[in-house]
Image (spheres, rainbow, N blue to C red):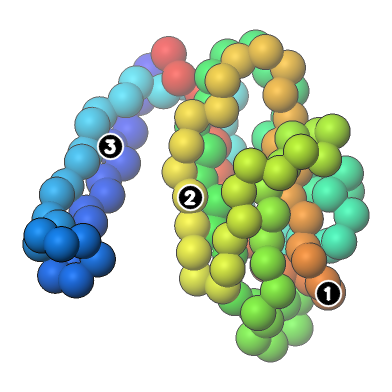
């Protein structure tokens, strides 16, 4: 068993009527199976880009749209995270990322580019 400490800090002086400033950094216990930080060239066919295989345990999933394609050129197309039946649950623009628990069952997660290819970073860890 290992410990993972994700941290998010949100600050703004003009996003709300009051200043916004908070940090969340809970520790979570994780185990195998896991995949360390990886990169994949994502195409417009989601079923060809499965990054989280089916499993019964909850996994913590990290995904980032790098803003680059396979030739290292800048891209502005959207990276969509979806379940294996093509139901989207996240849309990332260049430079955006997400970290979320993906609950048990037999959910697979795949990524899809709105156009061309997108290099995505991803990783996952299984919750204890």
Which residue is denoted by mark 2 in the rendering? 98
- Secondary element under disc 2, as helix, strand or loop, is strand
Comparing 18 with 105, the one in front is: 18
Q: Determine if residue 58 is in view.
A: yes
Q: Mark 3 points at which residue?
A: 5
- Judged by depth in the image, the label closer to the viewer, 3 or 2, is 2
* Residue 39 locus on image (x, y percent): 64, 59
User: Helix, strand, or loop for circle 1?
Assistant: loop
Q: How crowded is mark 3: few (under 14 residues within 10 Å), some or many (20 or more)?
A: few
- Ranked by sequence position, the earlier of labels 3 and 2 is 3
Q: Quadrant of residue 52?
A: top right
Q: What element carries label 3?
A: loop
- Numbered circle sitting on residue 116: 1
Q: Position of residue 50 (x, y in %)?
A: 78, 42
Q: Which residue is farthest bottom?
A: 73
Q: Do the residues labelled 2 and 1 touch (CB within 8 Å)?
A: no
The one nearer the camera, 87 or 31, is 87
The answer to whether 102 appears left or right of 19 in the picture is right
Badge 2, how many Cα within 10 Å: few under 14, some, many 20+?
A: some
């Amino acid at each position: 068993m290992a410990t993972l400490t994700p941290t998010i800090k949100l600050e703004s002086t003009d996003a709300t009527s009051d200043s916004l400033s908070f940090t969340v950094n809970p520790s979570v216990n994780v185990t195998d199976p896991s995949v360390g930080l990886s990169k994949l060239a994502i195409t417009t066919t989601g079923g060809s880009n499965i990054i989280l295989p089916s499993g019964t345990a909850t996994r913590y999933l990290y995904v980032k749209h790098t803003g680059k394609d396979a030739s290292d050129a800048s891209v502005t197309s959207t990276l969509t995270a979806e379940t294996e039946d093509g139901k989207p649950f996240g849309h990332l623009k260049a430079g955006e990322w997400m970290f979320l628990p993906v609950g048990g069952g037999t959910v697979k997660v795949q990524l899809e580019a709105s156009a061309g290819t997108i290099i995505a970073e991803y990783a996952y860890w299984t919750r204890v």
